Image: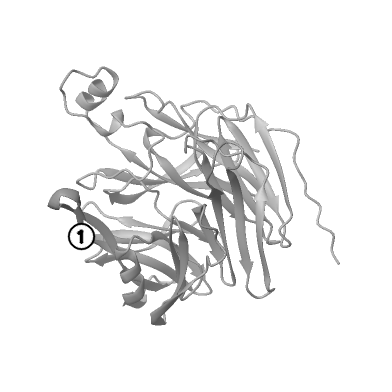
Amino acid sequence: MKKLIFLTLTSVISLNVTAQDAPQGYFTSEASTLAIGEDIAVSIKQYNPSQEEIKQASHPKANAPMNFLQVPFIVTNASLFNNGFESVLYCLDKTGRLKWQRPLGFSKYSGASPLAEDSGFLYAGEGMREDGKIQIQKFDSNGRVIWSKILDSLQAVNSINISGKMLNALVSFDANRKVDHAGKTFSYEAYPVYFFLQLNIQTGDVIRKEYQMMGNYMSSLGFANPYVNSYASYYLSKKDSAVFFSADNQKSANVVSEDLPRENSILTLTAGPSENHYLTIANGDRSTAAYVLFSDFYGAKKKYASKLDVKPGLDGYDRCYLLQTKDDIMISVIVKDRIANVCYTDKDGKSSCTGKKGILTSTVVGAGLYKEQPYFIEVEGRDKPGGIGTIKLVSY
């Protein structure tokens, strides 16, 4: 039997990068990030304000209309009436200096464009400035576009996975449902209508594009947070449950969160071809609230719920990320009060947590693994209304 030893680094790498070396912009508070070779890829959206909007945000006038730069930076899942967020792919070296950047597209939503990596190539997708079109692109490690695929009658690329010789993705357009309220009032709420898309990773040619009947029914009921985990399957989740879908069988779906207690809420989910993991918060007061990681390794028949030794902040602004090593160690990253808490959980559900003060100076917008060790993406400068942000790479 192999003995698992948790290795915790005791040193913190200080990256002395000037603002001129790092990407700057009016960034949103959500990023996708992953390692590619010796570098770090970051997908993040930015708002391109007018000078008047910048002035209004930093020196607001009474009764003047509010613009995006006045929204607190901690806000996630923001949306605009038009495709006003521009998505950009940045490649940073291991010190956080910018090597190259490429445009990905435009969206009305602030969430980061999905990224995937395979054999030194990057894959990313997003909507386009022209409404009703999406674009998926393949880049080499130097930022050269290998191929680009544009599809009509769609608005968003929601999740990407590379399996074998196929790029697998959930793509969507928005539909509206009527929501009734008290007093005989109602409103309309947008929800995504999904298609399961497969492209040849060598050429970008479409292999399949199929309407997701069961997935879209569940989407209309509020299930969101799409995560493609293999060549023909994906997950949707909401606060109280997570559901697994097969793209080849749209007559049924499997609930994978049967063991979730009523008081727990799902925060984030990740999955591989034969397992799923979701980090939850057990709601309660300061003494009973807790983070709990649920994992189910189907092939190994391992299933656990592991309580993490990190006390949740009661303001609801903790940032949480789930990462998985090549040895199937789950790494839960929980950022609260400028403290980076990292918990390592083995396949038997045994967890060990460490926290480091002082390495974070601003809001964390993403986290990833570089050579099996966690790193963080921060945005400095956006904490003040109208302030421009600078992307900062922090190693744990």
Residue 59 horizontal/vertical position (percent): 26, 17
- The residue wearing badge 1 is 176
Taking the spot 28% from the left edge, 49% from the top edge, the residue there is 106
Taking the spot 26% from the left edge, 48% from the top edge, the residue there is 108
Residue 30 horizontal/vertical position (percent): 43, 43
Residue 269 horizontal/vertical position (percent): 51, 58
Residue 7 horizontal/vertical position (percent): 77, 46
Q: Residues within 10 Å of mark 1 (few under 14, many from 20)?
A: few
Task: Inspect the image, locate mark 1, and give the three-letter code of the amino acid beneath it.
Answer: Asn
Q: Is residue 313 visible?
A: yes
Q: Is residue 211 visible?
A: no
Q: Against 224, is 58 above or below?
A: above
Q: How many marks?
A: 1
Q: Against 14, is 204 above or below?
A: below
In this image, 298 relative to 163: left or right?
Answer: right
Q: Against 342, is 196 above or below?
A: below
Q: Quadrant of the N terminus?
A: bottom right
Query: Which residue is nearer to you in this view: 250 or 283?
Result: 283
